[in-house]
Amino acid sequence: MHRKPLVLIIASGILCAFAAASASSPQGSPLPPSNPKGLEQIRFTSSGILSPRSEIMPGLAFPPQFSQEIKTLFFDLRDAVYNSAPPEKIEQMASRLMGELKQVSGNPAGVALLEARIGYLAGRAWKEHEGKKQAISWFERGMDAGTILASLEGETPAAILAYTEPLAELCLLKDLGFLMTNGPKIGKNADRILSMEPHNIKGLILKASALAYPPPIWGGNYGKALELYARIIELGSSGLPREILFDIRAGIATAYANLKMKTHGGWWFRSALELYPNNAYAREQMEKLAE
């Protein structure tokens, strides 16, 4: 999770700029463009599919104590964040959902997990709109909730993810000392998750993002990122939550863009925008690729 938040409506001019370079849009073909020599061993057989299930994380269902209203509010919040809604709106939605969770009894671990997800999402919204102070506050709330989750059920993959995702964002927002102390924990935590669950989708995305987004001097390795994303798509062949699929497609697009492969990057950013047409990150990146 890294990096920058992710996606937006593409202006017709940008689409035209890529029309000649791209064989077809994601809507027109389920098959992504093939890779050139040097990357031919990396094959994407599809751009991934949406899951029909309602899950907090891939493979992790909502606890039975959660009402349909809580589920609806969570997905509304998620989609608003990924569609780059104003942070003030996100603040209201997140606060309302936090209030609803106070009424839930009988599952403190489930409440802590959802609070961690809310903190991460709200922080992400403020970060995208350069609200550093508010973003740090929400990421810290998310990290605290993840730590509570770990105290309740142990260092499970879900608990490690719950506090590692906001920690990764805090490393980008706080001072160099915080980054030097906590930055190495992100990769180590991803390895811990995958040692327990080798096919954990979010754990694999955490590792892939660390390869796809930063420059090589900070650990970026775009070819390895693409290899890992291809594996993730195969593992998620039964379907993935919308925001997870978006993160995968945007991560692949970013890796290609960093390799200066505009046709491939454009195809994958358009594929990501099919999921969240107003995402600011993907729109900005599409504009850069069109230059």
Image (cartoon, rainbow, N blue to C red):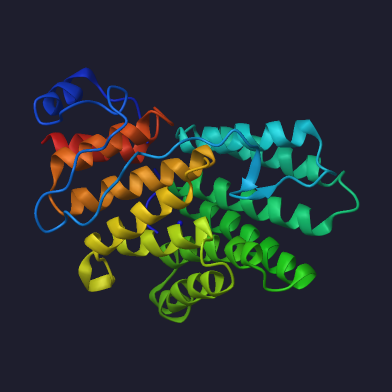
Residue 205 falls in image quadrant: bottom left
- Residue 157: horizontal and vertical position, in percent? 62, 66
Residue depicted at 65% across the width and 55% down the height: 116
Q: Please, which residue is most extreme toward the right here?
A: 106
Depicted 210 relative to depicted 89: above or below: below
Residue depicted at 79% across the width and 47% down the height: 63
- Residue 272: horizontal and vertical position, in percent? 36, 36
Left or right: 88 as drawn, with respect to 54: left
Left or right: 233 as drawn, with respect to 10: right
Residue depicted at 27% across the width and 71% down the height: 218
Q: Please, which residue is most extreme toward the top here?
A: 12
Depicted 170 relative to depicted 282: above or below: below
Left or right: 164 as drawn, with respect to 5: right
Residue depicted at 49% across the width and 45% down the height: 244
The count of marks equals 0
- Residue 267: horizontal and vertical position, in percent? 24, 35
Left or right: 259 as drawn, with respect to 119: left
Relative to the observer, which residue lies in front, 41 or 263?
Answer: 41
For the C terminus, give its image quadrant.
top left
Q: Can residue 213 be seen in this view?
A: no
- Residue 67: horizontal and vertical position, in percent? 81, 36
Relative to the observer, which residue lies in front, 74 or 124?
Answer: 74
For the N terminus, give its image quadrant.
bottom left
Residue 216 falls in image quadrant: bottom left
Q: Can residue 105 be seen in this view?
A: yes
